[in-house]
Amino acid sequence: MSYTPHTPDEQRRMLDAIGVDSLEALFDAIPGRARFPELGLPAPLSELELDAELRRLASRNTGIDAGPCFLGAGAWRHFVPATVDYVLQRGEFYTAYTPYQPELSQGMLQAMFEYQTMICRLTGMEVSNASHYDGATSLAEAVLLALDATKDARTGIVMSPSVHLHHRGVVETYLRGSDAELRVPDDPTVAAADLADMVDERTAALVLQTPNVLGRLERLDGIAEAVHGKGALLIVAVDPIALGLFRPPGEFGADVVVADGQPLGLAPSFGGPSLGIFATRRAHIRRLAGRLVGETADADGRRGYVLTLATREQHIRRARATSNICTNSALGALAAATYLATVGKAGLRRIAELCFHKSHYAADRIAAIDGVAVNPDAPQAPFFKEFVVELPVPAAEANARLHDGHGIVGGFDLGRFFPGYGNRMLVAVTETNTRAEIDRLVAALREIVS
């Protein structure tokens, strides 16, 4: 079908109105050589030849299933039960996007309602939306919610320097051009209690992450009380897998809990698509961006599901909207709901326990290598799934040798995040890493640093 909506007569009348003879004349300002440049494209290929060429190009990538992988820093390798992909690939879910007509969308609406319920139970919060694009946009929306909720002269945001730097970058983009001021200390090891001391009468929110970008668990005891005492909100970013083992931020008094939902049934996939988890207190329910699904009953008393509080969205509130997000990551949220329903409460706890114990086993083995230090800035601090390894050689060099000489995908080069951290890598260990893989990494590192 043609996607040109205007008839030739309509086009002629528009051209006459602006005094132009033809459509081509609209482009007279563009030099002819730039309109149709020589692209130098190769000769066309048959479907068979194209398939072979794409496979050849794809083979240049290193897959996380090709060998041991210890790369994390925001996108991790976790086991995905077969039920997740099976549900996602059903046509009625795979093509569902805008469930504005509840009479036609009960399946997706119920799935989103179940997702919201599980996220609330997981985070210890009262309300969850469904959902955001990824953890970064969830965090940025949480900051906007805090600025809107506190209003008055509160334009400051205090953020821990150990919040993921890519997520911080999205927050900075959101705040660009506004009166808001983002204050982030330089020291990535600063304690949460010290950050709470930075909150003043101009601060709208304190933003923490636990486990933080270095894998360390932050102590949240008393933080919410200190922040609330100064009239600000507490925003906590989490790893949803860790919530299977540790107390949720909601029990510590957090006002907003956000997370990247990638560990809940989504493959790393070069960093996306992902899922943005967002949960908050009931007091802020009308400030939620994205979608909120509610349960109701029809005229015959039958249970049904509908989008609710839609006036919060930009397409209705327009200039009074607090966000420009009116959509969600529906398929990602469905994956997370399916994953959580499949593994269950006990299964999620077991997965978290495996991540915890396997990462500590790896840290103990690596720390025994001469010339190597684990979590050098805080050797006694608790950590989950990830830890810092300081090497006598640059992390980039070590990773190259791990890959080329041993077929191992090493940790994240922290020099990309923090000045002076060029010899440090962030090693991630999940339930998918076997003892044999960990021992293989230890042996390879010992050879590299010897």
Image: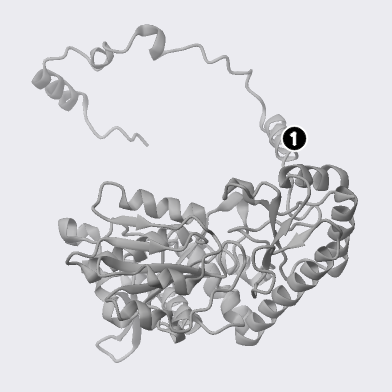
Return the residue found at the far left: 17
Q: Viewer-proximal residue, 62 or 196?
A: 196
Q: Viewer-proximal residue, 440 or 41?
A: 440
Q: Viewer-proximal residue, 76 or 85?
A: 76
Question: Does 184 sit left or right of 177 as displayed?
Answer: right
Return the residue found at the far bottom: 301
User: Residue 83 is drawn in which quadrant?
Assistant: bottom right
**Colour approach in the figure:** one colour
Q: Is the residue marked by circle 1 packed among few (<14), some (14-19), or many (20+) residues within 10 Å?
A: few
Which residue occupies 87% across, 53% down?
444
Which residue occupies 71% across, 30% down?
49
- Measured from the top left, where is residue 80 in percent x and y? 66, 68
Looking at the picture, does residue 367 appear above or below residue 254? Answer: above
Q: Viewer-proximal residue, 206 or 108?
A: 206
User: Residue 246 is drawn in which quadrant?
Assistant: bottom right
To which residue does mark 1 refer?
56
Question: Does 134 sit left or right of 373 as displayed?
Answer: left
Which residue occupies 43% across, 68% down?
195
Residue type at mark 1 is Arg
Question: Does 297 sit left or right of 83 as displayed?
Answer: left
- Measured from the top left, where is residue 403 in percent x and y? 80, 46
- Measured from the top left, where is residue 31 in percent x and y? 34, 8
Instruction: Tell me how many marks there are.
Output: 1
Q: Residue 129: in sight, yes or no? A: no
**Which quarter shows the N terminus?**
top left
Looking at the picture, does residue 54 appear above or below residue 378? Answer: above
Q: Secondary structure at mark 1?
A: helix
- Measured from the top left, where is residue 116 in percent x and y? 43, 77
Looking at the picture, does residue 289 appear above or below residue 53? Answer: below
User: Residue 222 is drawn in which quadrant?
Assistant: bottom left
Q: Residue 279: in sight, yes or no? A: yes
